[in-house]
Each structure stands twice: as C-alpha cells, then as structure tokens.
Amino acid sequence: PDGDGTVDPAQKLKGIRLDLAEWRRPDPRTAPSKSKAAGLYMICTMSKHAAEAKGYADAMMLDWRGQVAEATGANIFFVKDGKIHTPTPDCFLDGITRRTVIGLAKDRGFEVIERTIMPEELEGFQQCFLTGTAAEVTPVSEIGPYRFEVGEIAKTLMNDYSAAVQPKHAIAAE
C-alpha cells in the first residue's frame, strides 16, 4: 500500500498479502473498541509495521479471544461456496464502508453471514477481501500460510463499491 493506505490498482487486482498479527484486539471492556480510539491505533500501527518489515501489505488481527477480528485498518470478509462471511463487529469498528459493501452484496443476492470466525477456518475459504475508507474493497491473496483466489465476488463488489462512491458527473455550485 501507498503511504495513505491506498493500494496500487494493478496490485489490487492481484490481491494483497497479509501477515498474521502478533498483537490482538483488546477486550471491549478495556478500551472503546467501537470508536476510533488513539490507544487502539498503537496496536494496529505496531502490527502493520511488523507485517511491512516482513514484506506484507498489512496484518490480520485476532481479538483477545483468538477469533478473527479485522486487518489493522480495514474490515475483513471471506467467501466460501458463494456465501460471504465476516466477523461480528463486537470488538472493532463496524465501518461505514463495511456496512455499504454488505448492502451492495445483499442487493446482488449474496448471503452475508456475520459470525465468529476462527483462524483455523481460513484454509476453507476460497476468497478474502478487505473494506475500508482507504482500502475501499481490496482482494487478499494470502494471509500467512493461507492462499485465496481473487474471485468474482470480490471483483464484483470492488466494481459495485467504486460505482457507488464515484460521482457520475460533477455539478458546479451556482
């Protein structure tokens, strides 16, 4: 990713590589996890820098229970058998982009399942993608030892999201 968190368009189509973060998202009883809290940024920043030092674009965070939570600055989704799975946002920000993409997926007729996802399930998913303000919809090709295809669902949602947020034509203020 570039310094602003965006991903080069050519790299985006290949999917980015994530490391498995050493640090975890804290219990929401210890910090305000549903808001953008400065203390939580430190954990994510340290995890992202550690991943980048190893040649990865970002890192996937687990929560304090050992469940899949998110990437360091983006929400995470997985695809298995045509269904979209995403962690329940009980200890991380339920982002606007996340909610928008869930709506776009449902509009397309995709089933979206918000649930607990354990790390050992990663090998069973075919696709993975991130959503966020900077990431928009970014396919993931790898998380540690796990590999994912940049599949049609991720590509479709990437295009649908771009179409939803790009103005069709600018109207000058009069």
Image (cartoon, grey):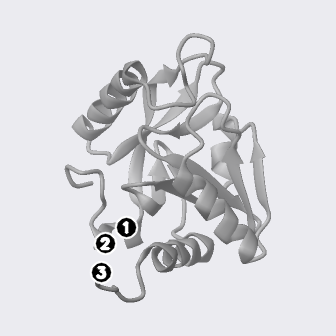
- Tell me the quadrant of the picture where the N terminus can be found: bottom left
Residue beneath disc 1: 12
Neighbor class of circle 1 (other Cα within 10 Å; few <14, some 14-19, many 20+) is many
Residue beneath disc 2: 9
Q: Are marks 1 and 3 in contact (CB under 8 Å)?
A: no
Q: CA distance from mark 1 to mark 3?
A: 34 Å
Instruction: Estimate the x, y position of residue 58 in percent, counting from the top left.
Output: 36, 43
Picture quadrant where residue 128 is located: bottom right
Instruction: Estimate the x, y position of residue 80 in percent, counting from the top left.
Output: 72, 60
Q: Are marks 1 and 2 in contact (CB under 8 Å)?
A: yes
Q: Nearer the viewer, residue 34 or 141?
A: 34
Q: Which mark is residue 108?
A: none
Q: Left or right: where does residue 99 sit relative to residue 138? A: right
Q: Earlier in the sequence, mark 3 or mark 2?
A: 2
Q: CA distance from mark 1 to mark 2?
A: 5 Å
Q: Which mark is residue 173?
A: 3
Q: Nearer the viewer, residue 115 or 92?
A: 92
Amino acid at the residue labelled 1: Lys
- Tell me the quadrant of the picture where the C terminus can be found: bottom left
